[in-house]
Amino acid sequence: MIPRYSRPEMVAVWSPETKFRIWFEIEAHACDALAELGVIPKEAAKTIWQKGDAATFDIERIDAIERETKHDVIAFLTHLAEIVGPDARFVHQGMTSSDILDTTLNIQLMRAADILLADVDKVLAALKTRAYEHKDTIRIGRSHGIHAEPTTMGLTFARFYAEMDRNRNRLEKARFEIVTGAISGAVGTFANIDPRVEAHVCEKLGLRPEPISTQVIPRDRHAMFFATLGVVASSIENIATEIRHMQRTEVLEAEEYFSPGQKGSSAMPHKRNPVLTENLTGLARLVRSAVTPALENVTLWHERDISHSSVERGIGPDATVHLDFALNRLAGVIDKLVVYPDNMLANLNKFKGLVHSQRVLLALTQVGVSREDAYRLVQRNAMKVWEQGADFLTELLADPEVMAALSEDDLREKFDLGYHTKHVDTIFARVFGEG
């Protein structure tokens, strides 16, 4: 994790303090269940809770023990024994390290998902506000980067809203997928621990018992979780790339807010660069870099190996911290995005009516001209606009073959911009469920 791209709430999810506190809670809840089953004394379970709950775990001490034992869970249990005293012998009865590690990881991913869902809500709110603000702001739609037909800036925001809304649904499913726990013993058979212990621990920690585990919770769950983060990251990049294109000097239909005192270049004082959305593009790449390793973690030897462990120690914090930062940055960019409607209209009119070519083509076919001939007539006049800077309507009016098929009034009507925005309200109702 890089502090520059980190937010405190998400960082705290992955802190050693949080991890060891969860480890303790799993062990203590398991002791409660074992006590109810008569496996350990109830007073011992009570003592473990009281002493452990009041303790501040000494991370340096745990690290020192691990340097000797070469085992993180044993190091923690040894330190816990120093705190609890003789009753610590009842801790970890019938459990294996993965019962602690995997259940903890899923709790951390659950908490991370909750933060990410709240982040997406911020993005959705910003997109919705800007969509309605610019619902009728005309701009040119582009395909292959080339002028196509008119659209509105509101529709641009609305389509990003719909995409992020789908991502929210995906994140909810990913959260559901990951919220399982396993307290099932060395190879998942419950040989030395009653399944009721697992049920109790999971209930207390907001998890579902894993239906069948080996020594580990199946990693297809984690693969799905990180794949979802990758999709969200790609959507962030999709929005960021649109803004970066709009901010290009030759386009300048919108730009990131440039604050007082901000500097764009150490060499060129005139520069106003899309640095935030470029940063979002890079962060998206980082988040997506977690997806392939997570997919590869699905394949483990027999009941368990630890090839997945080092991967998850990295991608768990890194992917969630970076995505949390990116979503919050994106919400801010959208909220403060400076939009230039006059530049949008100027760009749309740059090629003097060329964007209405399809309407003219369709009009010709509707009065009996073959599609092939209609295409030829419209294209030969359109090329004069591209190559000579001519006015499209003027060229069409001067074309005898076109005018033999259409009246002047009919032709001029095909250049009405309002024609292209007549269904904006319908699209908004589909996206936002209103109206």
Image (cartoon, rainbow, N blue to C red):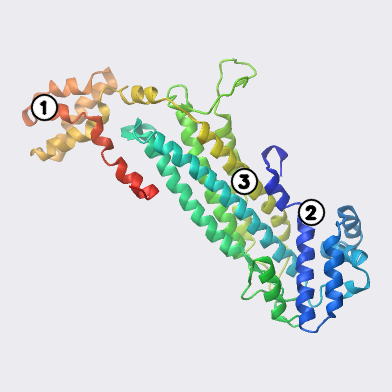
Residues at circles 2 and 3 in contact by the CB criterion of under 8 Å = no
Residue 337 appears in view: yes
Residue underneath mark 1: 409
Residue underneath mark 3: 324
| Three-letter code for the amino acid on which mark 1 is drawn | Asp
Residue visible at 40% across and 38% down in the picture: 132
Pointer 2 local density, CA inside 10 Å: few below 14, some 14–19, many at least 20: few
Residues at circles 3 and 1 in contact by the CB criterion of under 8 Å = no
**SS class, disc 2:** helix
Relative side of 140 to 317, left or right: left
Q: Determine the residue located farthest toward the left in the rendered image.
A: 404
Q: Nearer the viewer, residue 211 or 135?
A: 135
Residue 97 appears in view: no
- Residue 22 point in image, percent of width and height: 75, 61
- Residue 226 point in image, percent of width and height: 59, 55
- Residue 304 point in image, percent of width and height: 71, 70
Tell me if residue 191 comes above or below residue 11 in the rendering.
below
Relative side of 316 to 146, left or right: right
Give the Cα separation between the discs numbered 3 and 1: 56 Å
Mark 1 vs mark 2: which is more N-terminal?
Answer: 2
Mark 3 vs mark 1: which is more N-terminal?
Answer: 3
Residue underneath mark 2: 16
Q: Quadrant of the N terminus?
A: top right
Give the Cα separation between the discs numbered 2 and 3: 19 Å
